[in-house]
Amino acid sequence: MDSTSRLGFWSAVLTVALAAAFFGIGIFGSSYTEGVKYPYVLSTIRPMDYVVWIPAFLLAPTFVVLLACIHTQTRGDKKVFSQVSLSFGIMYAALVVSDFFIQWTVVLPSILANETSGLSLFSMYNPHGITLAIESLGYLIMDTALLFLAAVFDGKNRLERATRWLFLSGFILTVVSFGILSLAGNPIVVFEVVAVTINIVVLIVAGALLSLLFKRTNSVHRDRDEVTSS
């Protein structure tokens, strides 16, 4: 494989692994806001509720690398769409990485030091908290990145068509869910759970499809090089 295809392939594979780990730990290992009352600050730490953020934290820069590889291989007038997608992807990563970093460096040490005054809004257990709001915004921006990325794939084969419709479906589902849940007056935690579920499923499937596309692209380039050299 050439360097871009190799990096794209492995970032796609890593996207699948990290998204699956995030999803699995989130479902089976973390209780999130269940049973936690105001001021939403626990007297003891639940380590698993913070372990779930590790794969999500690593997923953000991996996603940016994946978009950069797609942008590099995009040609012609479609390159503007991959550029916009990469720009939104960077915005998503900046928000989510900052969000998780604040949990580890501000919230956790404050709880351990029993300095919990004013910590309520930053707690991951607060269904109306800043943490969940920032994360939810991040996933809306991720879906916007995927919307523009869908325009890169023109449907020349089944893999591209499947990838395109996957990205479009993820964007529509997330935006519609946000509109419905907001109008119904649900706390942001409800949308956060829905958005995470939609986006993680999209990333798992998309990562698998994109890894195949990178392998196929590399094969095409190799065949062209062989023809040229002969």
Image (cartoon, rainbow, N blue to C red):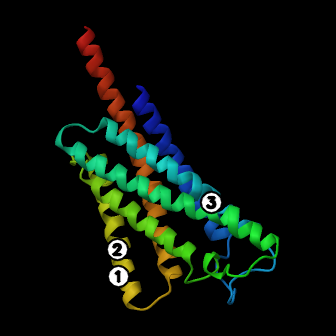
Give the x, y percent position of residue 156.
Answer: 21, 44
**Given the image, on which type of amino acid does mark 3 rest?**
Phe
Q: Are marks 3 and 1 in contact (CB under 8 Å)?
A: no
The N terminus appears in which quarter of the rendering?
top left
Give the x, y percent position of residue 173.
Answer: 35, 72
Q: Report how far apart the C-alphas of labels 3 and 1 lie in the structure.
A: 28 Å
Q: Is residue 198 above or below residue 71?
A: below
- Label 1 secondary element: helix
**Given the image, on which type of amino acid does mark 1 rest?**
Gly
Which mark is on residue 175?
A: 2
Q: Is residue 74 above or below residue 90?
A: above
- Label 2 secondary element: helix
Q: Which of the 4 quarters of the picture holds residue 217? A: top left
Q: Report how far apart the C-alphas of labels 3 and 2 lie in the structure.
A: 26 Å
Q: Are marks 2 and 1 in contact (CB under 8 Å)?
A: yes
- Left or right: 78 as drawn, with respect to 184: left
**Residue 166 appears in the rendering:** no
Which mark is on residue 101?
A: 3
Query: Which residue shows up at 29% across the image and 28% down it?
Result: 220
Foreground mark, 3 or 1, reads: 3
The C terminus appears in which quarter of the rendering?
top left
**Given the image, on which type of amino acid does mark 2 rest?**
Val
Query: Which residue shows up at 40% across the image and 32% down it?
Result: 5
